[in-house]
Amino acid sequence: MTMGAAMLWGVAHLAVERRRSGLALMVAYVLMLAGVLTVITAHSANLLSLAVQPRWLTVLTVALVTIALAWTAVIVWSFVLVRPPRSDRIGRFLTTTLTVALCALILAPTVYAARIAYLSRDVVNTLFPSSADSTPIMAHDPWNGAARVQFLLLGGDSAPGRPGVRTDSMTVASVDTTTGATTLFGLPRNLQRVPLPHGPARTRFPFGFSGAGPDTPGLLNEIFQYAEDHPDVVPGVPKGERGPTLLKQTISGILGLPVQYHVLVDMKGFAELVDAMGGVRVTIKDPIVYGRNREGLLPPGTRKLSGEEALWYGRSRTDSDDYVRMGRQKCLLNAVVKQAEPMTVINSFERLATAAKRTISTDLPQDLLPAVVDLSQKVKNARIRSLSFVPPLIDTANPDWRLIRGTVSDSLRERPSTKTVPTREKPPTTPQPDSPINLDATCG
């Protein structure tokens, strides 16, 4: 009878002729189920969006705990009404054990779900700045009427004896806000004589960025740290935001596109993310030597890489060059995104959350996250194109900035097919310089 009451509230009460309380419990149970089913069916498309909003995560946690406590109370109440007499020790022991098991069955998943919700809220609050510090986000038009939005994706790296962050991986994702059609613009780290935005930065480097001495030869990947070390070139911007601000403005000028947001992934911490999800599977075309003393080797073939191996896969330049590495980095990020299945994320959520807080930084405001989630669903159903400004298209020592902007403009005027790319059969690869726009290729 106690088990029956756990599956349908009020059964035990009716059995002992407490009809009023039994019917009240049944009505409450039906209303609760109806409410849960309504939320799931009516808002199923918005569940991911709700999962990135701290206030809804709080509401979810409170609702789950309330339901679990009410359910547990009903089970215990039902047991008290129908438990065997004291003289039946075996019967009372068995029913008590069953009641405890039923309560645990209700409370354990609730505690786990509440823990996940708490961690999610903590990640959102840690990684994403409060929207009070940014331009207000309009629910009906989160992109403020923009046809396209640009995200700067950065891979930051540091090394012993070289303090600070070098953004060795720089890709701008230009996304159509209506269709999700995306073009990735890859910029090599060794672009020289980069024109800086008008203002103090342009005044200091009127003929392009030239670095701050012999240890900084004046490459694009140095601008981030230079801004952090020289606050006067980005006046009024607090520490920690100077680098992203100047780099976004600089790359906006290079491409002729406004870059609204950035996401920076620390490459050392990236290894923790890969290990937390149990490794990442990639197909290696040519052997990759890694390690400071060439002690490691990633042989050709399809294999699952550990975090450390994935890090070297994305950063090694031994027997290759920056441009090959750029292609591997794109392949690696694509593989991680594709293999981060929901069950993998849930099973390793705590480790992933901890690694993400140490690894990722961004200026995406919290109120924009639901719109970003919705846009990401569109991107999954649209073709992603890639354009990299590498030799011989671009001479990195003396870049043709007008050619770069013209190529960007021409590529965005084209209308690619919205047919989904069969990524399993044709995953993206290293861009070939004689074909700057690549749609379908393979990793190597």
Image: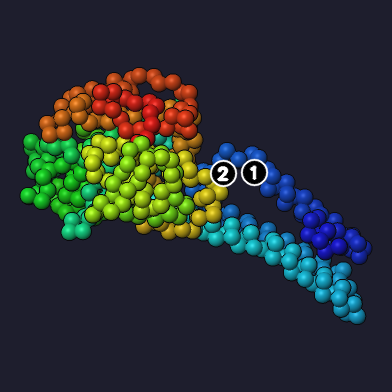
In this picture, residue 414 sits left or right of residue 24: left
Q: Residue at x 69, y 47 (%)?
A: 35
Q: Secondary structure at mark 1?
A: helix
Q: Amino acid at mark 1?
A: Ile
Quick one: 132 or 172, which is closer to the camera?
172
In this picture, residue 138 sits left or right of residue 198: right
Residue 189 location in percent, x, y? 21, 40
**Does residue 393 sit above or below 313 in this rendering?**
above
Residue 106 location in percent, x, y? 69, 61
- Image quadrant assignment for residue 7: bottom right
Give the numbered dot on residue 40. Answer: 1
CA distance for labels 2 and 1: 8 Å
Q: Secondary structure at mark 2?
A: helix
Residue 179 location in percent, x, y? 45, 27
Residue, disc 2: 47
Contact check, label 2 and label 1, Cβ < 8 Å: yes
**Does residue 337 sit above or below 398 in this rendering?**
below
